[in-house]
Image (tube, rainbow, N blue to C red):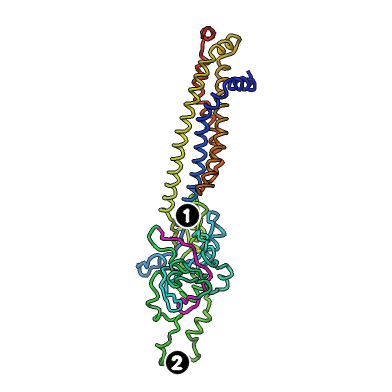
Amino acid sequence: MTIGRTLKIALRALRRNVMRAVLTTLGIMIGVGAVIAMSNIGQGSSEMIRRSVASMGANNLMVFPGAAATSGVSFGAGSAMTLTPQDCDSIIRDCPAVKAAAPIVRSRAQIVAGSRNYVPQSIYGTTPAYFEVRDWKKVTEGDLFEERDVRNGSKVCVIGQTIAKSLFPGESPIGKEIRIRNVAFKIIGVLSVKGANSFGQDQDDIVVAPWTSIKARVSGSSLGNANQSAAASSSGDNQLNSLSNLYPSKQVSLYPEQSAQQAADSPMQVKFITIDQIILSSDSADQVQPAMRQVTTVLRDRHRLRGDEADDFQVRDMADFSRVQAEQTSTMTNLLLIVALISLIVGGVGIMNIMLVSVTERTREIGLRMAVGARSWDIMWQFLVEALVLCLTGGAIGIFLGWLSSYLVTRFLGWSTLVSPAAIVVAVLVSAGVGLIFGFYPAWKASRLDPIEALRYE
């Protein structure tokens, strides 16, 4: 018998009792629909978890300078200034696994706005790519600074919510100025709320400005994490307090030296500019390790390090965040698999039950077909095709019901859902598999009937 003729006979047999066929496929419809709905909701939840964890830095890498050492004494990571803005440019250009990278110049000083003052946890000089790396492009007010502000060394900045509440309670800080070491920066934006990180540090306690401005006008060198506000009056280059210079020193220069005010107004640009660190992000958590290898290769090549020389930099990843993301995704996937298994087993048992009833009812028909020349394989194939038609029809309707359910959940409950084409393909394959597995025993039982006994069956 041809496949077309077998399919026609199977459809004719199913049309004899439409209601029973519909009730038989109901289990598959509910099972596949539940799987599709749960898959869409699970994919949406996983995406939300991924974004949430990524906002904390799951895909982030940080590059720090190496450690300087004198007479065998190491001064710790970051004490050797080996990173430059050109290193960051090379990473962006030559590392395919890196999505975005930004140089960072750190500082810590007291900021003053009117009669109020505050010492923020972080003052970062960077580029607009920093907000992409940190997934922090949203602002509650104003806007972010641009690349032209970095090129021009503009004295503009964006601040976090903690600083906005501390220095400008009950008013908008947009357009106002804050002074960092007597250098006025105009506030052009207020970042959205980020909250505390996994270490309990307030991420909203931050000032972000173009790194060229921070490097040339505020820090001038790597300042680390020490509180510079207490020692501000004792530093030399960028301070305007000249009370300690009331009387000239004994040694008088032949030419007049540049005053503190002149140095602050027109800082001299040095040819070799170093930065404190580079922060970058990969396309996904799976690309973190390839990105680390690529960054290491690029920096070793730029720093002209021989094969036997140790790295003069350190590349660190957020292993804890990546592990959390992997665990969350694995838990969601396992949950969906369990739900799919239970639902489809229930539907498959229903298919097997109805097919066994169908074999019993059609015993005389089976005996008659065998008597006129049908082989055991023809009988088995006929009942397998019937089971496949029932399962595939139920699977198709279940896919539509699952999509409709996920749409209604998004529409009325506001939950995030994400349609997964892979889940639809898997649902079709699983439906066919259920038809073959649970329809095999009834088909095998029908093919093993004795023709004479089948003809005499009442």
Q: Which mark is residue 171?
A: none
Measured Cα–Cα span from mark 2 to mark 1: 58 Å
Q: Position of residue 80 (x, y in %)?
A: 43, 68
Q: Which residues are magenta?
A: 177-197
What secondary structure is the stretch in magenta mostly built from?
strand
Residue 145: quarter of image = bottom right
Instruction: Judge the density around disc 1: few (<14), some (14-19), many (≥20) Cα neighbours within 10 Å.
Output: many
Is residue 184 located in the magenta-colored stretch of the structure?
yes
Mark 2 neighbour density, 10 Å: few (under 14) some (14–19) many (20 or more) = few
Give whichever of 165, 290 is nearer the camera: 165
Give left or right: position of 424 versus 116: right
Which callout, 2 or 1, points at the residue further toward the start of the chain? 1
Q: Amino acid at mark 2?
A: Val
Using the image, tell me which numbered label, if any, was put on residue 252: 2
Residue beneath label 1, please?
54
Q: Is residue 271 visible?
A: no
Give 107 or 52, whichever is nearer the viewer: 52
Secondary structure of the residue carrying tag 1 is helix
Say if residue 113 shows up in the picture.
yes
Q: Residue 310, position in %: x, y?
A: 43, 60
Against 162, residue 429 (above or below) is above
